Amino acid sequence: MGLLGLAATGICSMIGASIYVVPFMIQRNVPGIGPYVLPAFLFAAIPAALAAFAYIILASAMPRAGGSYIYASRALSPYLGFVASFSQWFGLSIAIGVVAYVIIPFLRDIASLLHFEHLAILLESGSVRVALALVILWSFVFVNIKGVKLYERTVIPLMVMMFGLGTIVIIAGLSFSQQDFEQVILTKVGRAVPQTLAVFNWPTFLAGSALLFSSFIGFDSIAQAGGEAKNPTNSMPLAIALAIVTVTLFYIVFTYSLYHTVPWSFVAEEAMTKDVTAPGLLSYLLPAGWAVLIISGAAIALLNDLPAMILSVSRLMFSWAEDGIFPKQIAAIHPIYHTPHIAIIVSGLMATIGILGSHFAGDFFLGIDIMVTSMLINYLLMCVSVLVLPKTNPSIASKITIFKSRALQQSLATVGTLWLLGFLSIHISKDLTTKVNAWYFHSTLVWFLVMLTASVLFFFNWNRLKKSGVNTTELFSTLPPE
C-alpha cells in the first residue's frame, strides 16, 4: 500500500460510529455530560495525540506487520507484547461486530423517511438486524481475503464518499439554529424541546472524555499494516500523522455543527429511549431526499470502518503466529490472493461474537467499553515502550528516524503515560461503579477474563517454543523478516 492507502486505513478505522453515534448516545451512557460534549472531545484528543506520537516513533524503527505487538514484544517483553495485543485484537474484533450491528438503524431511518414503514418495522426485528449485520461483516471479510488491491479499491472510494457526504451534514448543521429546530419539533410532532439547566461536573466530564477517547482509536491500524506498506519507515509515521490530524479536525467541526442546531437537552431525552444518530436528528429539519442522502453517508462512514479494522486485527494474529506464540496455521498465506486468510476468517468469527453480544446485551456500548479498556492499556504500553526501548533493545532504538531527540521522546512518552493512566483509572472506576443486571456487563471484568485467556495461551506456546529448541532471547530481540 502507498501513503494514501495507509492513511485511508487509519481514517476509515477511526471515523464511523465514533462520530455519527457516540457524541449523541453519550448523553445516555454518561448522564449529565449535557452541553460539554465538544470540550470533552477536545480533551480526549490530547492523549490520543500523545499515543500517536509513540506509534510514530516506534513505527519508524519497527516497520513490520503486527505493529503494537512487535513494538511491545521487542521493547518490553514477549508476554506483555502478546497479552496487550491480544486485548487489542479482542477489543477491536468485538468493535467490528458492534459497528456492523449499528449500521442497521441507519437503514431503518432511510426506510422510515421513504415511508416504507413495514420495512422500517422489519429492520427493528432482532433476527433481521443480526442477519443483515452478519452479511455486511462477512462481505468485508471476503474483500480482505481477496487482497490489498481490492482492499484499496474499496477503502479509498468509501473514504472520499464519507468526507463528501459528511460535509453535507456539516453544512446542514451550520445552516439552522436551535430556534429553527425547536419550531420544527413543535410544528411536526407537537412537542416542546425540554429546557434543562446544565451543571458542569468534573467527574462526569472526565468520564465522558474517557469514553470519547474511543473515537480516536483506529490510527494504530496503520501500524498493523507495516508488512504491506511501500517504504514503511517513512510512509507509516506520515500516514499516522495525517490520519490523526484529519480526523480530529473533522470531529470538531462535525460535532459543533450538530449541537449548533440540535439542543443538547433534546438529544439527551431522545437517547434515553432509542438509538440516536446525527442524520436522524437532522432529518427533522431537512426534506426527505436530503435526509436520505445524509443517512446514506452515515451508513457509508460505518461501512468503511469494517475493511480497515479487519485488516488490522488479522495482521496481529499473523504476527503472533509468525513468531511462534500462536499456531503456525494462523500465519498461512493464501496461494492465490497472498493474504493471511486464516487469520482474517478467525477475526471475522470473533467479530460475529461482537454482533451477537451487542444484540443480547441490548446496548452496543458494552462492546465500545471493552474496546476502550483494551486500547487504553495498549496505548499506555506504547508510551512505556518509547521510554524503555533504548535500554532494552538499543540496536532497534538506534533505527528511530522520527523525533530522534531522546529528551523529546521521553517528554512525550512520560506525559502520554500519565495522561493515559488517568483516563484508564477513570474509565475502570466508572465501569465498576455502574449498576448492571449481570456481572458480565462490566467491561473491566470481561477484559480480565480475556487477559487470563491470553496468559494461558501465551505460556502454553512459550513452553512449546522452549522445548522445540528455539532461542527465544534472539527471536524477540530482532525484527521479523520483511
Image (tube, rainbow, N blue to C red):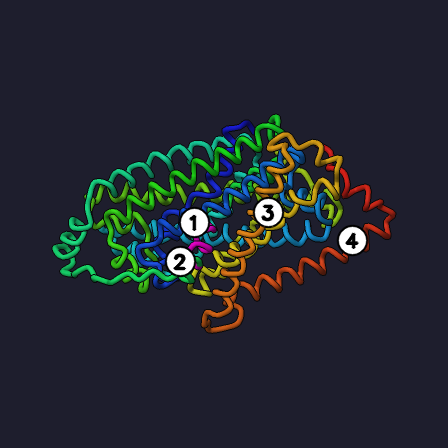
Residue count near mark 2 (Cα–Cα under 10 Å), binned few <14, some 14–19, many ≥20: many
Please state which of the two labelled residues, at mark 4 or mark 3, is closer to the viewer: 3
Circles 1, 4 touching at the beta carbon (< 8 Å): no
* Horizontal side of residue 116 vs 315, given as left or right: left
* N-terminal label among 4 and 3: 3
Amino acid type assigned to the residue bearing label 1 in the image? Phe
Image mark for residue 43: 1
- x, y (%) of residue 281? 26, 51
Which one is in front, 365 or 287? 365
Q: CA distance from mark 1 to mark 2?
A: 9 Å
- Identify the magenta region: 207-214
* Horizontal side of residue 375 vs 131, given as left or right: right
Q: CA distance from mark 4 to mark 3?
A: 31 Å
* N-terminal label among 2 and 4: 2
* N-terminal label among 1 and 4: 1
Circles 4, 3 touching at the beta carbon (< 8 Å): no
Image mark for residue 205: 2
In the rendered image, the vertical position of residue 310 relative to residue 130, given as above or below = above
Q: Residue at x 22, y 51 (%)?
A: 115
Amino acid type assigned to the residue bearing label 2 in the image? Phe
SS at badge 1: helix
Image mark for residue 414: 3
* N-terminal label among 1 and 3: 1
Q: CA distance from mark 1 to mark 3?
A: 18 Å
SS at badge 3: helix
Which residue does the numbered mark 4 point to in the structure image?
Answer: 462
Residue count near mark 4 (Cα–Cα under 10 Å), binned few <14, some 14–19, many ≥20: some
